[in-house]
Amino acid sequence: MTDSRPTAWDTYARSEPQRRTVNAKGETTWFNWTQYPDHGPGADVLGLAPGDRVLDLGCGAGGNSAHLATLGMTSVGIDLSAGQLAKARERWTGVDGMELHQADALAYLADTSTVFDAVYSVFGAVWFTDPGLLLPAVHANLRPGGVLAFSQRPPVEGCYGCQASYIPRGPDEDPAVVKRWDYEPDEWARILREHGFTDVSVSVLAAPPGNRRTGTLLVRGVRGVRGGQ
C-alpha cells in the first residue's frame, strides 16, 4: 500500500506560515516546545553541549533544528514532507551544522549508524508513530545517558492509544488522515520505562494566560542500559 503520509504533511505545510523573523526577545533563532509563541522551556530540556549530536524527528520547517545548530551542535532534522523541508532550506540556508533529510523516522533510525546525544520531537514523529516500534529504535540510537524528549497535545479524555488526525485539504477533497498515539501522562511514563528509559518526567504545561485552554504534554526520559548495551 502506498504511504499517503508525505502527501498529508505536504498539505499541512502549505497551510503553515514560516516562523517569525524574531521572537519577543528579539532573537533570530529559538527553541519552542509548545504550540504557543514565546512560551514554555527552551533547549536546556535536552541537556546538550556544543559539539553534541541531536536528532529532530519530524523537524517541519526546521526552526528548532536551526537554533540548535547555532548553539554549536550537529543538528539533524528528518521529515516526511518535501514541502516542509523546502521551507526549512529556504529559511535556514547558510546555517552551519544543520542537516536535513526526507525520511520516515523508523526507516532513518534503522539505517543510520550515528549515535545521538539527544533525540526530540515537537508535535512530530513521536506523536505519529507507534511507540512500541519507535522507542526501541530511539533507544538503540541514543548514547547511554542521552535524552529523549517530545511534546504534543494532551489526550482527549477517554481517547487513548492510536487515534485519527484529519488534515484539511481543498474544499472539494476529503481530509488527509494520519494516525497519532495519545496517552495520559502516567501511561507515557510507564511506556518509556518499559522501553529502557529512566529519570522519566511527564507534565502538562498550562497554556499561557488568555482564552486558550489546551496545554502541552511534555515528556522527557534518559536512555538507560538494557541487554548489556
Image (spheres, grey):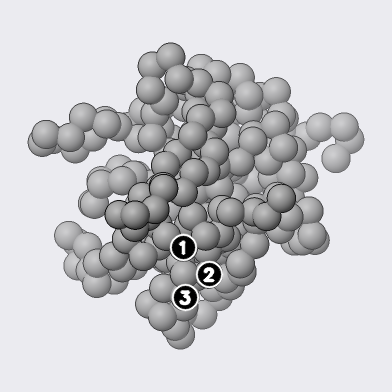
Q: How many marks?
A: 3
Q: Nearer the viewer, residue 135 or 158?
A: 158
Location of mark 1 (residue): 10
Q: Amino acid at mark 1?
A: Asp
Q: Are marks 1 and 2 in contact (CB under 8 Å)?
A: yes
Q: Is residue 55 visible?
A: yes
- Gap in angstroms between the C-alphas marked 1 and 2: 7 Å
The x, y position of residue 181, in whole percent, is 54, 32
Mark sitting earlier along the chain (1/2): 1
- Gap in angstroms between the C-alphas marked 3 and 1: 10 Å
Direction right: furthest residue: 228
Circle 2 crowding by C-alpha within 10 Å: few under 14, some 14–19, many from 20: some
- The image quadrant where one finds the C terminus is top right
Q: Amino acid at mark 2?
A: Ala
Q: Residue at x 46, y 49 (%)?
A: 176
Q: Are marks 3 and 2 in contact (CB under 8 Å)?
A: yes
Location of mark 3 (residue): 86
